[in-house]
Image: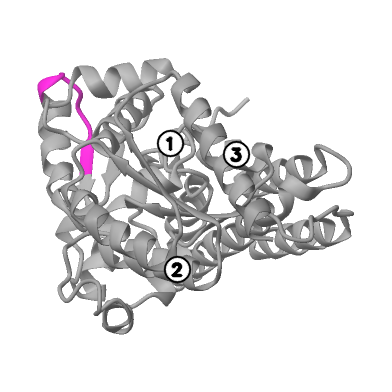
Amino acid sequence: MEIRIDSRKKIAFPRFSHYNYAIRYIVEQGIGASYVLLPPPTKKTTELGSRYSPDYACAPFKHTLGSLIEALEAGADVLVETGGLCRLDYYGALQKEIIRELGYRCEFVNLAEYMGGKKSAWLKLAKSLSPKLKPTQLTTGVYEGVKMAQFMDEIEEIYYRDAAFEAEKGRFDKIYRQYLMKMQNAENWHEIREGYQEAKSAFHDVKLKTPENPVRIGVVGEYFTAMDPYSNLFLQEKLVRLGASVSRFLNVTNCHFRAKESVLRPRVREYAQYNMGATTTWTLNAALDYAKQGYDGIVHVKSFGCTPEMDAIPILQNISRDYHIPVLYLSYDMQESDTGLDTRLEAFYDMLERKKKVLR
């Protein structure tokens, strides 16, 4: 019997919410390499990231470093790290040095080095990972992977908007989990599109018992922590269980394909005349939109020591004052207990609910 050995490079990317499914698709279908899809993070992930990180590093650095080390232990031979809009842009180089010092031998691709570069450089990178790659294959794989990410963002938006009001408890969660499982295993465009259409139709068919005036909460803040459920201790799930309709502007679709700095900056000119870096423009725009749309409260999420989001807090306080909308400020590092978070969220939700009753 002939034994076939998979000679493809095994590529890994740090865990980041559900987006690893789209990244897996791009790597396997677009590049033609193998992707190391890690299971959900555990206590070990956070311990690894914290143990080998500098004291000044933010929580996203620690989370991603822990993921990369676990990926190497799972057999990855190529690690890919992306750049950021803040000091995270330099973290790929630092993580590479840490991994080298730990004794791991692997290829390390820092996408920060390619940002703003020519398409030919990206194609050269892809071919270095898969020498037999065809450009049309890459183009198709990237397009379909990006569409998967956009579809997942849309399905997630519906889920957090309506899940609190389902007549039959657990229906929304079941549909959402089944959809994510299909995206985790999708191998072609038909499966991506079919999974999206089925989930959207299933959500539409769920009977809702939506209150006449439900509590609506908007989530803003630092890019990674606000989007990654494990990093924010499943903040949005907790708000849904309390009975809130939850919205979060920050996702890959809005931040990278819709929102442009040149358009968003003038909209918050009365509160901030300059770009303060990283995700602050998105944070302030989303908060202002939530305030103008009559949302009941805003939750601001950041990693501990995130300078741009710290700078945004005084402006959020001004928006809160002008529109009479309460803001709850949450700062995360690598804490694993969510008892304190539960208490704060319950108090915040109860306060918003009482305020609505008084104003009726």
Main SS category, magenta section: loop
Of tags 2 and 3, the one toward the viewer is 3
Q: From this viewpoint, is residue 112 visible? A: yes
Q: Which residue is mark 3?
A: 350
Under tag 2, what secondary structure? helix
Identify the residue at horizontal 61%, vertical 58% (top origin).
157
Closer to us: 4 or 240: 240
Q: Going by the image, does 212 lie left or right of 192?
A: right
Of tags 3 and 1, the one toward the viewer is 3
Q: Which residue is mark 1?
A: 232
Closer to us: 133 or 253: 253
Query: Residue 15 appears at what percent x and percent y?
Result: 41, 38
Under tag 3, what secondary structure? helix
Dot placed on the residue nearer the N-terminal end, 3 or 1: 1
Identify the residue at horizontal 69%, vertical 61% (top origin).
360
Q: Does the magenta portion include 107?
A: yes
Q: CB of mark 1 within 8 Å of CB of mark 2?
A: no
Q: Which residue is mark 2?
A: 254
Q: What range is drawn magenta here?
A: 101-108
- Count residues near mark 3 (Cα–Cα under 10 Å), then give few for <14, some for 14-19, many for 20+: some
Name the amino acid type tagged 2: Asn
Dot placed on the residue nearer the N-terminal end, 1 or 2: 1
Distance between the alpha carbons at the discs numbered 2 and 3: 30 Å
